[in-house]
Amino acid sequence: MGQVREENQRLKSMLSQIVKAYQCLQHQFFELVQQEKKVEMGPSRSKLSLPCNQETKEEAELLSLTLGLSSSRLKTDGERINISSMRRESTKNGNSDSKQELSLDSCNGKFMSCDHESSKDPKEGELSRTWPSRKLLRTLKSDGEQVLEQTRLKKARVCVRVRSDAPTMEDGCQWRKYGQKISKANPCPRAYYRCTVLPSCPVRKQVQRCIEDMSVLITTYEGNHNHPLPISAPVMASTTSAATSIIQSSSSTSQQQQQQQQHGLRFSASCGPASTTSTGGMYGLDYTGDRNPKLPRIYFSSSSQISTCNSHPTITLDLTSSPDFSDLDGYRYSPCFPSLLTAPSTYLSFCSPPPSSPSSSHLDTTTHKPSSGIGPRVLNHGMPPQHQFYQPHLWPVTKSQASHPQSLPDKSGAEATKAISLNLSFQSVLAAAMTSFASGRETDCLGDKGKEGGFGRDLKLGDDPATPIKLLQPSPQADGTARVSSNYMDKPTAFSSREGPKSSIWFPHSSVALSTSKKSARASMSPAETKDHLIKFLGNSDM
DNA sequence: CGAGTTTGACCGGCGC
DNA sequence: GCGCCGGTCAAACTCG
């Protein structure tokens, strides 16, 4: 006991030294950035209404670098943001920005998943190459914690509900069916698929019809791709990665949870085995608020009602709601979402929270109004032509219609739903949001970092009514086109909108696919970035 | 004939 | 320990 105490004391002193050193470095870092800001501070910087808090200022600076918000970074002639310059910035800004480098690397087409299974241990990677039997995997269990974590991560899932008549959902990947089973709860057979793009790819998916609504196709993804994905596939990969990150971050300590709750966010204790009833914990990213119907609500509900899901923490991405098109105009769907009640684990929905979820809490950004409304046509932005499954004519909303939404037929709602399900751009944003949100949480869990750049700051930003309004200001391109870049487009592609003001959209969501490993999860956006990400996306999409 | 699907058997986790 | 159940395996089958 005495030795343990001594060891404890020694560790404590070491920890305090490290903390001191960290604070010292942090201080130096802030000073450096401050100096740099003074030098670089141009008129464009005034576009960002920075919070008075010094710390948050730093975050805003980092945000501008990451998202390209700063017009000094966005070339007015539509030239692509100079990634190398961003990298220089990243290097300048210290170790925390090495994250950015990671995401930028992925931006360069090195779209390799940082799958734990393949990246962690070459031995494991070798094994997975030949679809190791569970016997083989069992032998690996002696590896202790590492394997435990791997198992945990492996079980992270993303459940996508889509209204579709097709037997499976087109997600861009190649799948091979390896089994089918009729589960007890659902008479509809559940099909098991694995990714065949690469024999070693650990990703699997399950496809099953919803028992309540046979027209709803429930696709559950598990694992992360360890190969470059087909052009249209990264969305789900990103989402799966996000799920993994969320699961990873679910291990946050109660103290951190307390901090988060103090900031207005509530997380359920975990996605772990404890909860078999609805805890009502919601990962809330509410960019809408009652006063702002123009932005979507995103809820990461961690309510867990299906006990079997506890071992498989799941994010449910429900794209099945048949929204009132008038609401869709503002991405605000029908308020009631019955399926939410049966949703396992984490839930992502595009509608208002169900009245039965009183415990839900979300980022309150209700005071943040976008510069103007958005129309569904925005969903087509950001998609390369080959991905425009739904042509603009399916979005028959004009400004006048938007203001008189009731003139739209209900049929359009179904189309809209379908289009949203298929629209990679919008999904990408969501995936990015999920990933970054998750990674933000994770960052929060990693220790002191959480105090610096986790929710605390995100919420500060969000709670500051002045800030996001400024951030919502579109950054018009000089050539009057909407510029979009995504991880499936090497170069930003210019789309000419049919009407309305032009805007600039920059999605650095290439990072989303890298969130599986802790390293890459850190490379993703912070929650604040995520929010701005979405806000900017939606705010700029005003046509 | 190779690739993909089907389907019964098998395995492991979990609850009782 | 036993049985249930979800998930996976692998041989048989189908299809192009």
Image (cartoon, coloured by chain):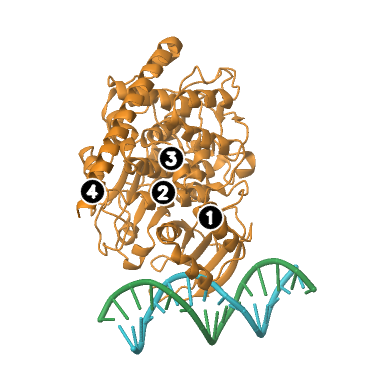
Chain colours: A orange, B green, C cyan
Cα–Cα gap, marks 3 and 4: 21 Å
Residue annotated with mark 2: A245
> CB of mark 4 within 8 Å of CB of mark 2?
no
Q: What amino acid is found at the position of numbered circle 4 in the picture? A: Ser
Q: Earlier in the sequence, mark 2 or mark 1?
A: 1
- Secondary structure of the residue carrying tag 1 is loop
- Establish if C8 lies above or below A539: below
Closer to viewer: mark 2 or mark 1: 1
**Quarter residue A272 falls in:** bottom left
Residue A541 visible in rendering: yes
Q: Secondary structure at mark 3?
A: helix
Q: Position of residue A268 (x, y in %)?
A: 26, 52
Q: Is residue A412 above or below residue A202?
A: above
- SS state under label 4: helix
Between disc 1 and disc 4, whose residue precedes? 1
Circle number at residue A522: 3
Q: Given the image, on which type of amino acid does mark 1 rest?
A: Asp
Q: Position of residue A245 (x, y in %)?
A: 41, 49
Spatial separation of the CA atoms under disc 4 and disc 2: 18 Å
